Image (tube, rainbow, N blue to C red):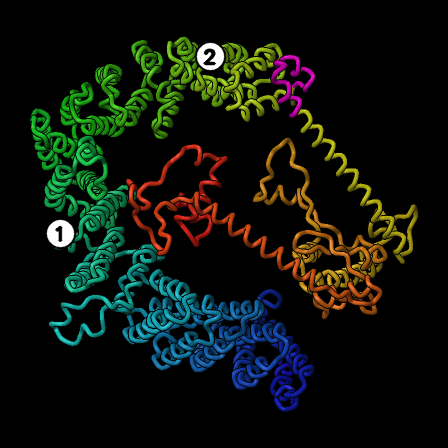
Amino acid sequence: LFVVVTKFVTDNPIVSSAAAIKHNNAVKNKVIQLISSIFQCLIAIIEYDPAAVADTHTAALRCTQKEISSQVLASLLQKAQFIMSLLKSSTEDTSSSVCRVVFAQLIVTCTCAVIYKEEEEEDDHLQQKHLILAQKLYPLSLQTVVHCCSGGNTNAEDDAVYRCSIELQRLNRLFLSSDIIISSEPILVSCVESMKLLLNFKYRNHWNHLLQAYSHFVVQMVLNSNKDLSTTPLASSMIDRIVELHLAKQANDAGSIPIIENAVGTIIEGFGIEKFLLLCSPLDKSSGASNTSQSTRGLRPARLWILNLLKTRGAKYYAEEPTYHLEFFQSHILGLARKCDAAAATDVSQQQKQACIDLWSLLAIFSTNPVDIQSSLPIFVPTILRAIQDVRYHPQLITILCNSLKVLASGASQRMENLSDKKSSHFSVLQGDVMVISEVSVKLLPTLFKMVEHLTATAPDKSTSMGEDGGNNVSSTLEQQEKMQCANFLTDAIAALASLAPPEFLQSLFKKVMHRLILAIQDQDDSRSSRVDAYLRLAQALVSSKSLDGSSVDLLYRAIKPLIRSDEQCLKTQKSAYKVMAEICDSYPKFVNSSEKMIEISELLIGSIMACHISARQMRLKCLNSMIKNFDRENAQHMDLLVQMTGEVFLCLKDSNGKARDLAYEILLSMARVFHDMNAFFPVVLGALAAKTAHMRSAAVMALSRLVFEYARHDEAVQALLPSLLQTVVVLFDEKARELIKSVVGFVRISVAAMSREQLEPILSEVVAGLFKFGRGKDRFRAKIKIILKKLVRLFGYEKITPFVPESDTRLLTHMRKLAERAARRKAESKQQSNADENNDEFQAMMESDEEDSDDGLTLMTGKTGFTKLTAMTGKTVRSSATSFNKSVADSAGASSVGGKSTKSSKRTRRDEEAGPRVLNAEKDGEVLDMLDNTRMMKQVRFEDTQAYDGDDVSDDGMMEFDSNGKLVVQDAALFIEGGQPDISMDDEEADDAENEQINNGKRRRVSKFENAKEAKAKTHTKKNEEQRQKNLNKNALGTAYKAKKAGGDVKKKGQKFEPYAYIPLDRKNYTKKFRGKAVSQMESVVKNVGSKRKRKAL
């Protein structure tokens, strides 16, 4: 089979001679299809697995396959130029695209089969022979597959190029992993030049596929080089070529820029930031001219976009265990940053300054898993301290460095904790890294402490900054926000470093902070609140590190108690104190859960409720939540404290802050879990219904609603309490407070959904009557009431609910009933109509079917009618063709309206007929149909079946024409030429003349001079009336009192008090909805020659 196929490809005169098929496209296409079939046959031979059938001759058969593969590959490479020229000259895109893909697959399959080696192969000499052959043929194979990747703009061509690019990646992946190929510089040079062809402009329509193959080639060549320096210049040249392509395409083809950036990003992800920067330098080429200019020039402006890719794609380095070197960052990246910093002094556009910041932002990536912490970090710390205090790059550099320190410290401790083998050498390395970070934290923490104190002390106080300038100082507000953000990042870094700092050093720092905190609290100067806030931030950071002992935590608790208990301090100070308290509750549960401290802290929180400011309520709720979770239901004192906290929690359910409301609901559920028995907890909640204020009663109802929603589905005790709860809450419908009624309606809705029919029936009258007790205010809750009524109607029906509805509100129920009946009626009619249409279609199809009927008029094909879908299409196809012909005639008739122009109606009719009329079902229950919902729209939209029309029913006489005003146009028979079609060459005047001649017995009526004079006089009179009307309107227009009579501008006349247009009288009636149009028209004299939108904006 191989001999026959190969001989046909190589020796057949039709295939080998291009002149024989040059001018015969039919033969050419047939030859292409034949070649494609031959290639597929060869692929099947080469990819055949002999181990599946003949186990004893596996080695021999595979050797034969290699011989076949080498011969086929050599023959194909010789005929490659002819085959490609044949495919490019083909007139059929599909067959040529398929053949090109199969050709590329065969090339790659043969090349891979030659180098493939099985474990059972023992003939090393033969294997070496095949490897040498593959070494020679690989560049030619690669070049041939690259040429296969060119194509047109059609979808078939794009799919073919994509599949060829996959084969190209398969070929490179196998050969670049071979030591013989990767160590041969001539072969790599040839392959690199072939891959660079993909960057030519003729391939740019398919760069989204081909540049990925280009990027993977670079990555595999670098990763498989095994530190071979010969591949470095080649990889660098390939990267420089694609990077320079970004600049070349920037002006002409902006659509290719994202594709090029994605390809470069793939290279960065392939071998990381370090290797990429070694292969591709973003420095200005002129920077190496002299030592003096090198220090004053930064990055090349054309390559600044690479920094964004380094930040975003560098973190996705997909090695098994990505490692980084702080020494590389310090020597290479910081060297680039220093040059950008020097160039920023003369850079007006600030690009070099931003580039310096972007380079520093790479430190967070290098801090994830550095392998040289012990050797590089102590040397790097002084640079970090200098950079974090450089005010020129604040606040960006503070954020970057603090985040990097946090990642470095937390990552080192996390890696040491996750390592299971504590006796391995790797664990000792991680332990040494943690020790080095602990040592450098002694140098870092004091500086970070000072920066927090400085930023917080210089930030203006929120409570006093708004009073001096009325809140108009936007710049100071933004500056304050930046400083507070920097302080937050600093405290996060302090917390991460403090967790690894030496205990003695940390205790000394904590004592200094507490000493200064107490002194700041006792001071009476103006900067007291800022200093107190700074020290509270530092204390919170140390608490979150979980490195303080019990005595230190107790000292801090005693220091913040006065700040929580009273409101004498600044509001910001109280909020910071609550933050520290919440952090103590989260980080030191043993301290909080001790019997003495739990009672003390609970009483502190309960007793300070009146002094708590609204801004500190969220932090206060966090403290309450931490305390309540640890309450013991067996402890009577704990349960008493829990009951005392319920009032505050209920009120916070209606807080304006969404986070505070969520915390309040979480605390409510925590209380329910502590009680465990709903029969004991619900009376506590129901007690709040007897509160004096409607606000408190509304909050209690909301609490009941949440408890019912959470527990009614699976708690039988709550399910049994629902009837009595609903009966109790319904009484509140007699209240007049709107917020209370809103809560009660919500509770009724949840309860009705959770209760059964048997539970609802005894109190149905009370529920329905209560829903309509709010008078005119019930219109605000009409939608919710309607939802509840629908649920009740589904359970009990209209007959049982109607007697309980007041007579004044029966219209709502009647309307709902009509909508339901209408929807049901339309549904039944639609179903009946669909059945009738189906029966009619079956009858028509049976009448026109030529298939022999089986017994009872059924066939095996359809099961219902005596015809198949295939034979039924014969009759319908004839009708559909006649219908389409008649419609085309009607369209041509409709296109020639009066004046020979197509009207909007005719255009809309033709457009609708092309897709079929779209029919929407009626909206049900008064609801608006969501046309963006695909599921509902598929059910609501149906298209007219064009095949259902009979050709006899469509005629030219039935087509109606409309003019631009929507009037019916009647075409005269005299205006039509033979064949029934209108003469579209006849214009309006000719049509009028023809009509006049027909009316006057073929003679054109002559108009007298008297009639002409009369018509001209009427036109003059109409023009004068219009001018007078416009003149009267201008008299009443705004600003006419200042208008000059002889000039075009405005003048100030005697007796006028105001300057021209300095005063426009305002009348509130003119700006109501009724008179708004009149006011806009009056403003035309002020704002002229603009659209209506501009006038309304001016008004």
The image position of residue 716, as x and y in percent, is 53, 16
The image position of residue 899, as x and y in percent, is 69, 64
Instruction: In the rendered view, tell whether residue 636 sits above or below residue 753.
Output: above
Instruction: In the rendered view, tell whether residue 249 sits above or below residue 417.
Output: below
The residue shown at (51%, 67%) is 162
The residues colored magenta run 796-815
Say whether residue 813 is magenta.
yes
User: Which dot marks residue 390?
Assistant: 1
Of labels 2 and 1, earlier in sequence is 1
Residue 907 occupies which quadrant of the picture?
bottom right
In the image shown, does 134 or 387 lie closer to the viewer? 387
| In the image: residue 699, left or right of residue 278 | right
Label the magenta part by its dominant secondary structure: helix
Q: Amino acid at mark 1?
A: Asp
Q: Which quarter of the image is occupied by the N terminus? A: bottom right
In the image shown, does 89 or 441 lie closer to the viewer? 89
The residue wearing badge 2 is: 735
